[in-house]
Amino acid sequence: MGAVTDEFTWYVTRTTGLVSWALLAVATIWGLLLTSRLLERRPSPAWLLDLHRHLGNLTILLTVVHVAAIYVDDFVDYTIAEILIPFVSDADTLAVRLGVISFWLLVLIQGSSWLRRRLDPRLWRYLHMLSAPLLVLAGLHGWLMGTDVNNPIVIVVGLVLTAEIVVILALRVRYGRRPILVDTRA
């Protein structure tokens, strides 16, 4: 494809990977706030639910772009099977496996959100609780595979988002959670 295109796909891969993880973390934060008692008198739960959904949709969109950029990049030269199935690639590493598993967890969680009205609420909640392992696995994928792990901005953003999630989880445990908002819109 040429040096400019290879460099472009490398930047797209890095950027979409980092932004996808950050969006995943922010979507997790909004989801935790939505189901916590911390925002009783703050923005309406419907607004939070819409924002949470849009963040999830953006996360999956950017993750698909991330995967597509890996596929078209001549430097890594992965096949579709190697990108989508763990343990298939000759260059398969723990970081690659974590990325593939993270992708499928994201698809499962976001897919369950799209099908929420058709799923048993308990099943949907259990599937949605996979967001925590997803966030950890995707973070480990980026940390082990990424070339930006020593970038101070990446470090600070990662630490701030992780700290926010830990604090909100601790407050949620302390003050309890409220019933999950049921969206009655068609």
Image (cartoon, rainbow, N blue to C red):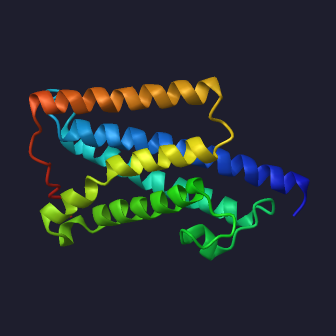
What residue lies at 65% left-to-right and 70% top-to-bottom?
A: 89
Against 89, residue 47 (above or below) is above
Residue 40 visible in the displayed image: no
Looking at the picture, how far across and down is residue 55, in whole percent? 40, 47
168 to 119, vertically: above or below: above
Q: Is residue 51 above or below residue 113?
A: above
Near-viewer residue (105 or 12)? 105
- View extreme (right): residue: 2
Name which quarter of the figure residue 86 lies in: bottom right
Give the percent coordinates (x, y) of residue 77: 76, 66
**Which residue is depicted at the point 61% across and 56% down?**
66
Q: Where is residue 26 in the image (x, y as percent from the top left)?
A: 39, 38
In the figure, 74 relative to 27: above or below?
below
Residue 1 falls left or right of residue 27? right
Q: In this view, does 79 lie to the left or right of 120?
A: right
Is 49 on the left or on the right of 108, as rendered? Answer: left
Quadrant where the C terminus lies?
Answer: bottom left
Q: Give the number of callouts.
A: 0
**Camera-side residue of 52 and 157:** 157
Figure quadrant of the N terminus: bottom right
Residue 94 appears at what percent x and percent y? 56, 55
Which residue lies at the image location 21% right of the left edge and 40% below the top edge? 34
Q: Which residue is drawn at 9% across and 46% down?
A: 179
Q: Is residue 89 among what the camera can see? A: yes
Q: In this view, does 154 lie to the left or right of 76?
A: left
